[in-house]
């Protein structure tokens, strides 16, 4: 029963609504030597510490939001007010906008200094790095007080021209964005880590082993040699007060190693006996850079007695960062043995255990909280089959596990009852086991370096015996022996299935080396998937779909496919139900109608986000993979429902509506007008007059049947062709009918309905509409049936709606001219078109 209760509480979103404003995690700021009183912000600059913060018309959440601001935005504080709820709000000004922001999300720009994620940044110069979770402001100088010269979207890759550490010890990168140079704080970059993480590059000083978890009880997964540069993702102090760091030791693989591996030899190890501050120098007059808790074990690098006869110790308070603490903060302990016994006490599993675990959400909706317990706030939610890599878990008071994961809203915790554990099948084989080459055209080297001599090429599926494994220059190398007895080294990406896939953003050349002067070996196109083997400055070593290996500029690759349908959802727009997908880039889709109630949408799509929620009128929706690995969307509609599909630059929409004319929205276009009379008959009948009269009669017919109608013109006015299609393309309507009268010679006769399918996305439905209208129209008015024809008329070709152009009869024929001028004929034509539309919407 306990499990059932936990699961229902955690998986039901209505039990704990998300307060977006209140749950947005605040950024961490380094301590300042000066305390800021709230009122002192008035008249000064302030810094936003969270994203998606509402700017409101007044000092309270009951006032309307006028815009949103994000982390790093500088604002001028004009006034402060304490409202009836006791909340403190600031009136601020920025970018010619004035409004109110709650005080929780503002810090004094001159005293709150954001902690840097890099130590100097110089090692990044010349590399290409990616903007992380939030859009980045590029400024004219290397502090937030400088003017914003551009806003760079999330995921943008930028070449780092140089790095600079300002007076606040913030590391800023000089970058080139769209031909314009400026400065972006390093905290906004992913820095070669996984998406959304910040990271630090550090060089190993002391050889050490890398483990699955943050104690030596965990299995050894690799060894890091002195001089190896590794990406550090996070720090953790275990139950033994040992400081460990999580690193990437091979492509797509993380592990844990002692932080002391990155530190120079220490003179002693000591434990903090009282909470103390870490200073940038050996007196309390220096800036505070960190605070240490009781029980923290630290390496001591040097001892110093200042002018006041106070003894201070230099310590490492974070990986790559050193500071000073007074000697009276410590008690001495014996130095930690170089190789402590592997018989260490186990980690206290009633608290936190640091270990990577692959998990998958097993319920429709799961609440994710700010801490490991149901008493913590819900910060976001996940859906069934969402997968995460948990970096640690904690057990609560009733000994149930909570898993910590990284989300777009920051770190969050998810309960064991709403997830399942996913076994990792892509582990590197243990020593003395056999392995198999999984890449095309793998190379074996004489040593664990890409600069060493190539011994031979290894085809895909070649088997081998594993002798040893080491990490060198950030790459995991495996010493192998082939079945023919040849020994050598291969990088681990040659045997891993789980290596990154990226996509081409345009047609680009693949070279044999990391230079445009190298030989051309292949070409990739927009949306072509490639496997990423390694990077070198601004170049990426890839394997193409055809198995060819080469180098390509990082700037022409994207982590996400530009041709996919994402964020699938249901929406209600103007009282009608829609299926909606977002398009991350501009591309064209195609659809067919295998049967009257089935829709098939395709177009080189790498992925289609499945819509889980139900919508009235849709019986079934599924996504299929077809030849070439592309995705196809198949929707089966209820027999009593129909749909209108639209493909715009930014989204695909499918409006689902009951069959019949009732509630349908139709645009009727009377051809020509004013200075453009159209064709003129022998008795001077003008086409523009016939089309307008028929359009008005059709409007009356359709409205009587329950439809909504818009006329492109209701009087004798002139409209450009683009003005007519703009009315359709900016609407949420269901069909477009353009009315005309034909002209050739006195013996020409009959009725024709035209459509376009070569350009118009809605060609399939336009053809169906044309057939339906043509059939009922000629039956009603009794003219010769010239049939349905495809043509490149502008109003059909440039229309996003199902659209047709009807030529009622020949105004050049004296007999048909007389009919066209007749009110009775015009009304009959309107009735015939109405019947055709009714049959179309009932199919």
Image (tube, helix red, strand yellow):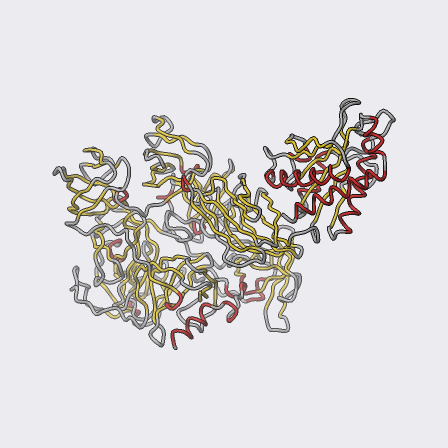
Q: Is residue 813 left or right of residue 394?
A: right
Q: Residue at x 66, y 33 (%)?
A: 788
Of residues 216 and 424, the one nearer the viewer is 424
In which quadrant of the rendered view does residue 261 lie?
A: bottom left
Up-down relation of residue 757 to residue 296 (above or below): above
Q: Position of residue 551 (x, y in %)?
A: 35, 34
403 or 473, nearer to the observer: 403
Res 315 → quadrant: bottom left
Q: Residue drawn 21% across and 37% down? A: 444
Relative placement, left or right, of 265 versus 529 is: left
Query: Relative to residue 12, is residue 286 depicted above or below?
Result: above
Residue 121 spot, x, y in % from top left: 38, 46
Residue 69 appears in the picture as rendered: no
- Number of dots carrying numbers: 0
**18 shown above or below 73:** below
Looking at the image, the residue that sits furthest to the left is 485
547 vs 61, nearest the viewer: 547
Q: Quadrant of the N terminus?
A: bottom left
Q: Position of residue 250 (x, y in %)?
A: 28, 48
């Amino acid at each position: 029963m306990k499990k059932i209760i936990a699961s229902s509480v955690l998986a039901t979103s209505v039990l704990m609504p998300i307060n977006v404003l209140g749950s947005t995690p605040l950024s961490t700021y380094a301590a300042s030597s000066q305390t800021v009183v709230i009122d002192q912000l008035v008249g000064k600059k302030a810094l936003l510490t969270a994203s998606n913060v509402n700017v409101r018309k007044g000092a309270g959440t009951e006032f309307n939001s006028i815009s949103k601001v994000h982390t790093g935005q500088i604002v001028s504080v004009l006034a402060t007010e304490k409202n009836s709820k006791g909340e403190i709000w600031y009136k601020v000004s920025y970018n010619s906008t004035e409004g109110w922001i709650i005080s929780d999300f503002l810090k004094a720009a001159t005293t709150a200094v954001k902690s840097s994620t890099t130590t100097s940044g110089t090692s990044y110069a010349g590399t290409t790095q990616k903007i992380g979770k939030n859009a980045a402001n590029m400024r004219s100088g290397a502090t937030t007080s400088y003017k914003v010269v551009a806003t760079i979207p999330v995921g943008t890759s930028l070449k780092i021209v140089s790095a600079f550490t300002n007076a606040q010890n913030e590391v800023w990168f000089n970058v080139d964005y769209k031909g314009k140079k400026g400065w972006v704080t390093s905290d906004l970059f992913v820095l070669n880590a996984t998406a959304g993480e910040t990271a630090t590059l550090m060089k190993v000083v002391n050889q050490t082993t890398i483990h699955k978890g943050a104690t030596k009880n965990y299995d050894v997964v690799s060894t890091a040699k002195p001089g190896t540069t590794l990406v550090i993702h996070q720090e953790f102090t275990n139950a033994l007060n040992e400081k460990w760091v999580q690193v990437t030791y091979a492509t797509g693989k993380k592990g844990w190693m002692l932080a002391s591996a990155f530190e120079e030899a220490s003179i002693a190890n000591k434990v903090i006996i009282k909470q103390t501050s870490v200073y940038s120098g050996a007196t309390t007059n220096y800036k505070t850079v960190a605070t240490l808790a009781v029980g923290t074990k630290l390496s001591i690098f040097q001892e110093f007695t200042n002018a006041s006869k106070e003894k201070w110790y230099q310590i490492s308070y974070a990986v790559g960062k050193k500071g000073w603490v007074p000697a009276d903060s410590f008690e001495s302990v014996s130095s930690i043995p170089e190789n402590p016994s592997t018989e260490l006490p186990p980690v206290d599993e009633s608290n936190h255990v640091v270990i990577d675990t692959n998990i998958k959400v097993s319920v429709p909706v799961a609440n994710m909280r700010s801490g490991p317990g149901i008493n913590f706030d819900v910060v976001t939610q996940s859906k069934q089959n969402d997968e995460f890599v948990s970096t640690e878990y904690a057990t609560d008071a009733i000994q149930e596990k909570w898993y910590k994961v990284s989300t777009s809203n920051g770190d969050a915790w998810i309960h064991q009852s709403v997830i399942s554990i996913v076994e990792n099948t892509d582990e590197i084989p243990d020593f003395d086991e056999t392995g198999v080459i999984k890449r095309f055209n793998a190379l074996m080297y004489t040593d664990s370096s890409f600069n060493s001599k190539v011994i031979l090429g290894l085809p895909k599926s070649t088997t081998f015996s594993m002798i040893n494994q080491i990490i060198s220059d950030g790459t995991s190398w495996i010493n192998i022996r082939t079945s023919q007895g040849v020994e050598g080294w291969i990088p681990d990406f040659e045997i891993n299935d789980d290596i990154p896939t990226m996509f081409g953003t345009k047609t680009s050349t693949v070279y044999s080396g990391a230079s445009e002067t190298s030989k051309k070996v292949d070409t990739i196109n927009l949306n072509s998937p490639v496997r990423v083997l390694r990077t070198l400055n601004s170049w990426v070593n890839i394997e193409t779909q055809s198995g060819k290996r080469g180098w390509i500029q990082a700037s022409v690759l994207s982590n996400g496919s530009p041709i996919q349908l994402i964020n699938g959802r249901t929406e209600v727009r103007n009282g009608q139900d829609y299926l909606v997908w977002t398009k991350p880039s501009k591309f064209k889709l195609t659809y067919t109608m295998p049967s009257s109630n089935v829709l098939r949408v395709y177009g080189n799509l790498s992925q289609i986000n499945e819509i889980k929620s139900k919508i009235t009128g849709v019986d079934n929706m599924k996504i299929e993979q077809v030849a070439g690995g592309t995705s196809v969307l198949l929707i089966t509609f209820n027999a009593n429902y129909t749909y209108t599909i639209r493909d715009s630059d930014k989204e695909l929409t499918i409006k689902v509506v009951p069959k019949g004319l009732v509630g349908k929205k139709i645009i009727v276009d009377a051809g020509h007008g004013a200075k453009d009379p159209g064709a003129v008959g022998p008795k001077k009948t003008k086409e523009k007059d016939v089309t307008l009269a028929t359009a008005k009669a059709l409007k009356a017919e359709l409205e009587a049947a329950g439809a909504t109608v818009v006329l492109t013109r209701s009087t004798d006015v002139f409209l450009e062709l683009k003005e007519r299609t703009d009315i359709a393309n900016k609407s949420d309507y269901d069909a477009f009918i353009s009315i005309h009268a034909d002209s050739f010679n006195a013996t020409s006769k009959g009725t024709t309905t035209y459509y376009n399918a070569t350009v118009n996305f809605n060609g399939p439905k336009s053809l169906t509409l044309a057939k339906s209208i043509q059939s009922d129209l000629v039956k009603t008015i009794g003219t010769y049936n010239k049939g349905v024809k495809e043509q490149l008329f502008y109003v059909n070709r440039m229309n996003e709606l199902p659209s047709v152009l009807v030529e009622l009869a020949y105004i050049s024929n004296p007999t048909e001219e007389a009919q066209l001028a007749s009110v009775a004929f015009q009304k009959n034509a309107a009735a015939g078109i109405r019947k055709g539309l009714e049959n179309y919407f009932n199919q």
